[in-house]
Amino acid sequence: MGRPAGWGAAQTGRPMMRSPGHPGISRELERGFWVKIAAGQSSENAAVACGTSPAVGVRWFRQAGGMSPLQLSPLSGRYLSFAEREEIALLRVQGLGVRAVARRLGRSPATISRELHRNAATRSGQLKYRASTAQWKAERAARRPKPAKLVENHQLRQYVQERLAGTVKTPVGTSVPGPQVTWVGRRHGRRQDRRWATAWSPEQISHRLEFDFPNDKSMRVSHEAIYQALYIQSRGALKRELTACLRTGRTLRMPRARTRGRGKQFITPEVLISQRPSEADDRAVPGHWEGDLILGLDSSAIGTLVERTTRFTLLLHLPPMDGHGVAPRAKNGPALAGHGAEAVRDAIAATITKLPEQLRKSLAWDQGAEMAQHAQLRIDTNLEIYFCNPSSP
């Protein structure tokens, strides 16, 4: 005769849990994916490194809004880890009692007793402790069904949305001017189309709540909670399109480690200006040049080459390349506006090779993408090329 329905729940002290159904994604696999994302890897590379397909990694990243849904930092010592649960299972098989197991793990006997009852497996009709089952039950119980604060508090949500969108009004309907936002040269569409010119940042909103509602503690929210409500749609509070009001305009959150690794891949320590011969610094020997681009309207540009000793200047003609403005640009193809890497390489080579060889010693340029073909240019012209330090043209 089988056990009555609900017997396991009565023995463990927990309500009955739904069957997990088809085995889902391993929590350790998903945690490993987000650890690699935090380290700066792309979604595809992080997925492959964890043993899954690149398409799955891209889907995880976009569904989570670029923010890890898991706790990546180690849990505090208050909670039992999976390794400790494995140790408990092994010691129980060896016949050790609750207090003996607690002494081995350095835990309270009450902690071990609760663990053996709450997270025991009941499918076999009796209480059996298995580490994997106990870990699954603990993770299920640790989930927070508590809704986000911005979902429950309509007044707080309305306050945040109005300031994110830059349309702030008083209770009587009069408009309130937003903060003065200075132009810092970010390249996210045309300036007049950017909604954040009058919008408030999440951090400004968070601090302003303390002044507008000094006595209402319910009108408090951190800027991180606002970001999560924007990027993680499962939090279900703010509209996703409000991300256009943020300073960066990103629709996904980017780990800082990933942005740090986005430097110019063609710049190496061997081609920095610190390696340029010392004779170029005192301007005593001719043949050392400095170059730059002058950009105009409609993607027009000309290049300049200035000789350091004589100040003799050469201008580079950079007309649009064939196919510019006629057909859509090919993906990963050359820039056709006339000042891409290939166009600049060819223009410099065609101009400077007309000079005597003793006047072709070195060329210094800032770290612009138009010099990505500098290795081929060095071969074509026998000209040593050096780059300025970042932010020091």
Image (tube, grey):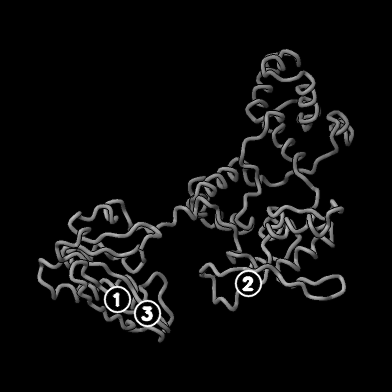
Please state which amino acid type lies under the numbered disc 3: Ala
Q: CA distance from mark 1 to mark 3?
A: 13 Å
Decide which of tag 3 and tag 2 comes sooner along the chain.
2
> Is residue 165 found left or right of 386 in the rendered image?
right
Amino acid, disc 1: Gly
Q: Amino acid at mark 2?
A: Ala
Q: Secondary structure at mark 1?
A: strand
- Whole-percent x, y for residue 271 in the image: 27, 55
As drawn, the label of residue 303 is 1
Q: Position of residue 230 (x, y in %)?
A: 69, 61
| Among the two numbered marks 1 and 2 on one chain, the one whose residue lies closer to the N terminus | 2
| Disc 3: which residue | 337
Determine which residue is flagged by label 2.
Answer: 197
Q: Give the Cα distance between marks 1 and 2.
A: 33 Å
Mark 2: few/some/many CA within 10 Å (<14, 14-19, 20+): many
Circle 3 crowding by C-alpha within 10 Å: few under 14, some 14–19, many from 20: some
Which residue is drawn at the image coordinates 68% and 53% (left, top)? 224
Mark whose residue sits in front, 1 or 3: 1
Give the left or right position of residue 324, taking residue 181 as reference.
left
- Give me the residue at 49% from left, 53% from top: 258
Image coordinates for residue 86, horizontal then vertical, percent = 65, 26
Q: Residue at x 80, y 72 (%)?
A: 169
Disc 3 element: loop
